[in-house]
Amino acid sequence: MDSLEELRLKLKQFAKERDWRQFHSPKNLTMALCGEAGELSEQFQWLSEDDSKNLSEKRLAAVKDEIADIQLYLVLLADSLGVDIAEESARKIEENALKYPVAKAKGRSNKYNEL
């Protein structure tokens, strides 16, 4: 798949064929998204920093599945609210660039109001 738009259209068709759009309210999609994020974090629970960077093939496959689930729910949520993910992501990067200027933020993990 080459774009978020293609993914969005494919998901809409998938849901339409199953008559699932009726369940895709912003509330329900947000709850599903949070559940999937929890399942992703579960894959890393109790791992050391080094272990989290060197996953077994089995664990990496599970992580990939959870990342995909999160992305799919995020695309559905954005679609249900009429949000263009690429446009809003670009806007947010620009906003963060102002909050975290390179001269003050480079190599630091402080929040913008602690710089």
Image (cartoon, helix red, strand yellow):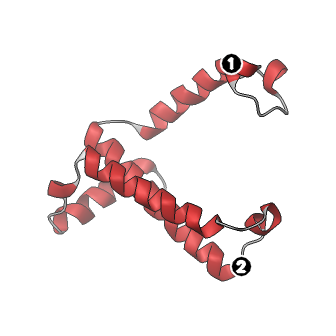
Amino acid residing under circle 1? Asn
Q: Is residue 12 above or below residue 106?
A: below
Secondary structure of the residue carrying tag 1 is helix
For label 1, count other residues whose C-alpha is less than 10 Å away and answer few (under 14), some (14-19) or many (20+): few
Left or right of 62: which side holds 23? Answer: left
Query: Which tag, 2 or 1, sits closer to the chain's start?
Result: 2
Left or right of 37: which side holds 75? Answer: left
Query: Which residue is at the far bottom?
Result: 58
Q: Quadrant of residue 55?
A: bottom right
Q: Quadrant of residue 62?
A: bottom right
For label 2, count other residues whose C-alpha is less than 10 Å away and answer few (under 14), some (14-19) or many (20+): few
Question: Residue 75: horizontal and vertical position, in percent?
Answer: 38, 50
Question: Residue 58: horizontal and vertical position, in percent?
Answer: 63, 82
Secondary structure of the residue carrying tag 2 is loop
Left or right of 15: which side holds 107? Answer: right
Check disc 2 and report the residue beneath it.
56
Question: At 35% across and 36% down in the image, what residue appears?
Answer: 83
Q: Nearer the viewer, residue 91 or 52?
A: 52
Question: At 54% across and 31% down in the image, what residue appears?
Answer: 90
- Residue 22's tag is none
Residue 69 seen from this side: yes
Amino acid residing under circle 2? Ser
Check disc 1 and report the residue beneath it.
113
Q: Is residue 48 above or below residue 7?
A: below
Question: Residue 99: horizontal and vertical position, in percent?
Answer: 66, 19
